[in-house]
Amino acid sequence: MNDILPYVISAFIGIGLAAASGFRVFLPMFAVSLASYVGWIPMSDNFEWLSGLPTLITTGVATVVEIIAYYIPVVDNFLDTITVPLATIAGSVLFASQFMELGTFPQWALALIAGGGTAATIASGFAGTRAASTATTAGIGNSVVATTETAGAGVMSVLAIFLPVLAFIFAVGLLILVLFFGRKLWRKMKKQNSGIF
């Protein structure tokens, strides 16, 4: 049991960080970079670049730019078109960074499925929410969506680093919510489109 526990905790941290990547691509990477730079979380040799000062500065600047960009009309919707693949990559990298003693193939297979899948699902859900907000409020409500996403990324990043079990529970809850409301939204849009034709 004690042999499995580190892997379980690593998985919880990885899922939490992947979920955070679904909200914002760079904020979770900045959080991990900062946490590893100051020694709060260890990094394997393959991911030492995450704990370096250049990565810390780069992800910090990218975080600020990303947060501001989501408050600019039209730009926010454009970002949604590239966020899902970027979130998938970020979620996979952050998930993989938590496994130090796993072989390369299982590490990246797990990272793509669990980390990338979690990030992509949440990113897609919020892209759909912003599209609905743009359609129903002419973009006025998009700032609320942007603030929620930034807060979600920050909270999930902190929880993943300091309270990974809670982060995992929240991540699973988020996935269920996104899948449930996403299905409802898809059915509603399908009904509206069938009504038009």
Image (cartoon, rainbow, N blue to C red):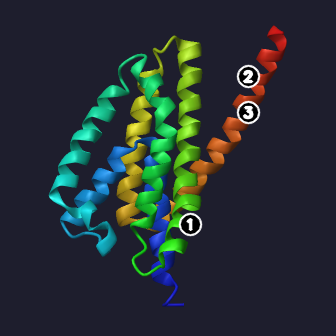
Q: Furthest-bottom residue in view?
A: 2
Badge 1: how crowded within 10 Å, few (<14), some, or many (20+)?
A: some
User: Which residue is labeled 2 in the image?
Assistant: 189
- State the residue at coordinates (56%, 66%): 109
Q: Furthest-front residue in view?
A: 105
Number of on-image labels: 3
Q: Is residue 27 visible?
A: yes
The earlier-in-sequence mark between 1 and 3 is: 1
The earlier-in-sequence mark between 1 and 2 is: 1
Q: In this view, does 23 lie above or below 31?
A: above
Q: What's under tag 3, amino acid-wise?
A: Lys
Q: Report the disc number at residue 28.
A: none
User: Which residue is labeled 3 in the image?
Assistant: 184
Indicate the secondary structure of the residue bearing disc 3. Answer: helix
Q: Do the residues labelled 1 and 2 touch (CB within 8 Å)?
A: no
Q: Nearer the viewer, mark 3 or mark 2?
A: 2
Q: What's under tag 2, amino acid-wise?
A: Met
Which corner quadrant of the image does residue 185 belong to? top right
Q: What's under tag 1, amino acid-wise?
A: Ala
User: Which residue is labeled 1 in the image?
Assistant: 109
Give the left or right position of residue 50, taking residue 79 as reference: left
From the top left corner, tell me how far across and down residue 14 is, in percent: 46, 63
Alpha carbons under labels 1 and 3: distance apart:
31 Å
Q: Are marks 1 and 3 in contact (CB under 8 Å)?
A: no
Q: In this view, does 162 lie above or below 137?
A: below
Indicate the secondary structure of the residue bearing disc 1. Answer: helix
From the top left corner, tell me how far across and down residue 166 is, in percent: 48, 62
The earlier-in-sequence mark between 3 and 2 is: 3
